[in-house]
Every structure is written in C-alpha cells, then in structure tokens.
Amino acid sequence: MTSAVRYEEDVVAWSTEQARLLREGRFDLLDIAHLAEEIEDVGKSEQRELVNRMAVLLAHLLKWQCQPGRRGASWQVTIRNQRRGIARRLTETPSLRPKLNEPAWWAGVWDDATAQAADETGLADFPDSCPWSADQILDSGWLPG
C-alpha cells in the first residue's frame, strides 16, 4: 500500500501526510523515494542560502571597495545583515563550515558576486578570485579599502 496523496499532485498535502505517517509509525505507507529526495533537498537549500548570502556580501564588499564615493548606510546594513545571516547558517548548520575551505566553492561564489556587482555598478574590472580571506569577509568590523 502506498501514500494516498501523490507527491506529483500536491507536495504540501503529500508532506503533511508523510509526516503524519512517520509519527504514527506507518512506515509501510511511506513514499520512501520522494522522502529521500526531499531530505536531500533540505541540505541543498541550506547550501544555496549560504552561497546566496555570501555572494550578496561579497558583491557589497566589492562595491564598497570600488565605489568609495557611493558608500552609504544601506550598503553597511546589507553587509551587516548578510554577515549575521551567514553566521546564523554556520551556527545552525555546522556541516556547512567546511565549504569556506573549498576553493571550488569560493570560485562559484566569487563568480556570482562579481556578476551581481557588475550588474549593479556597471563596472567589470574585478579580480579573478576573491582577494580577501574568509576571516576578513566575516569579521563584523572589517571593510575593504
């Protein structure tokens, strides 16, 4: 016997039913394949959030460095909020911290950050790789330039 609600038809109703079946110990009725997929997606979502927050932070640090005449409170607020969000992600999901030591991860984040900074500033002459350390980037008192 399988789940009464189909994953493909209504993922919210399906997830509610799957949670109920788990709590009731009705393991024979679970949609194991889709449950496994959804569990993996939770981890991917956490990783995407870290990438997105880091790219926004780096883009704002680039703008801060490259456009000193345009520095303002809104950029500082964004930088502070992204640092806070990243710190929260790393505290709540410590298995993400090793990403900060992966050159390939940084390369992807840096590409996202420079694309965003280019779109927002019209500038395009950014370094090929991130010139700052993870410690600097996450230091609440540090700003480039």
Image (spheres, rainbow, N blue to C red):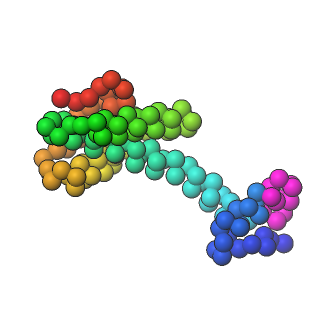
Point out the residue furthest to the top here: 141
Judge left or right: residue 110 versus residue 105.
Answer: left
Residue 124 forms part of the magenta stretch: no
Q: Position of residue 97 (x, y in %)?
A: 47, 34
* Magenta region: 20-30
Q: Quadrant of the N terminus?
A: bottom right
* In the depicted structure, whether residue 4 falls above or below residue 25: below
Query: Residue 2 is drawn in which quadrant?
Result: bottom right
* In the depicted structure, whether residue 113 falls above or below residue 137: below
Q: Is residue 97 visible?
A: no
Identified at 26% across, 29% down, the residue is 143
Magenta segment main secondary structure? helix
Identified at 46% across, 48% down, the residue is 49
Identified at 35% across, 40% down, the residue is 78
Judge left or right: residue 126 versus residue 130.
Answer: left
Q: In the image shown, does 21 or 62 lie closer to the viewer?
A: 62
Identified at 66% across, 76% down, the residue is 9
Q: Position of residue 80 (x, y in %)?
A: 37, 34
